Amino acid sequence: MNDFGQRLSQLKAQIPEHVRIVAVSKTKPVCMLRIAYAAGQRIFGENKVQEILNKSPEMPSDMEWHMIGHLQTNKVKLLIPHVSMIHSIDSVKLLNTVQKEAAKIQQVVSCLIQIHIATEETKFGFALDEAIELFEKLVPQDYPNIRFSGLMGMASFVQDEHEVLSEFKSLKNLFDKIKMTSMSGHSDFKEISMGMSGDYPLAVKEGSTLIRVGTLLFGGR
Ligand SMILES: *Cc1c(COP(=O)(O)O)cnc(C)c1O
């Protein structure tokens, strides 16, 4: 087994089976992604549209690209044909653009609404109350080309575990609230994307279903 394979199995051994791993391959060359693919990894996360466009023709088609970074509306059209899930829906305008472009090529795209749970102002996403309002107003039938799959959040980059834990808890609570109200009866609404190399054990403890791990699998950037 190669190094990637070893790191992947070590990671898998630490998380429940239902938690899926998004291997964050941003800045890493295709040769490293191929090694990851050979080790059985099928979900790859990138934060730039251009990187997905460059790498996607070089990789087998039975894998999934997940867009995890801030997405500009003018790049949506280019991205849609290549992407299975967008974790970073951070505005209604972006949601509307994804619907419009996905409809044009008759594709259904899984989308997560990004929630701002960190104390840092630099991070994108809806505030907790904005997200509740969004889902209260949302008419999923108006978005036939979007699969509302759940929520995504990034915790603050701090050492304080209590802080990180409470941010993950707030995302889980919000998910539960929306799942019980606006999205009740929507079986697709089931994902909580939270946890990275530095904080995935806490995220998993708080109910993450998708962890986005780069450094731990591919090494530093
Ligand atoms: C880069 C990135 C990750 C992965 O970070 P690591 O610390 O390398 O695991 C996860 N999520 C997002 C949104 C990222 O941009």
Image (cartoon, rainbow, N blue to C red):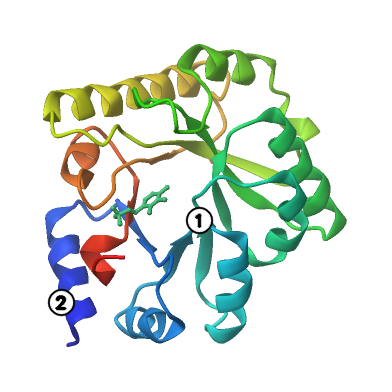
* Kind of residue at badge 1: Asn
Q: Give SS at disc 2.
A: helix
In the picture, the quarter occupied by the N terminus is bottom left
Measured as percent of width and height from the top left, residue 153 is found at 40, 35
In the rendered view, would you say 26 is above or below 161? Answer: below
Measured as percent of width and height from the top left, residue 36 is found at 33, 78
> Mark 2 vs mark 1: which is more N-terminal?
2
10 Å crowding of disc 2: few (<14), some (14-19), many (20+) = few
The residue that disc 2 covers is 6
At 58% from the left edge and 33% from the top edge, which residue is drawn? 90
Q: Is residue 119 left or right of residue 201?
A: right
- Mark 2 to mark 1 CA distance (whole Å): 25 Å
* Kind of residue at badge 2: Gln
At 24% from the left edge and 69% from the top edge, which residue is drawn? 219
Query: In the depicted view, which residue is nearer to us: 65 or 117?
Result: 117
10 Å crowding of disc 1: few (<14), some (14-19), many (20+) = some
Query: In the depicted view, which residue is nearer to us: 186 or 42?
Result: 42
Q: Is residue 164 left or right of residue 178?
A: left
Q: Splitting the image into 4 quarters, where does residue 209 fall?
A: top left
Q: Is mark 1 within 8 Å of ligand 1?
A: yes
Measured as percent of width and height from the top left, residue 136 is found at 63, 14
The residue that disc 1 covers is 47
Q: Is residue 217 left or right of residue 191?
A: left
Residue 144 badge: none
- Circle 2 or circle 1, nearest the eye: 1
Q: Splitting the image into 4 quarters, where does residue 11 fall?
A: bottom left
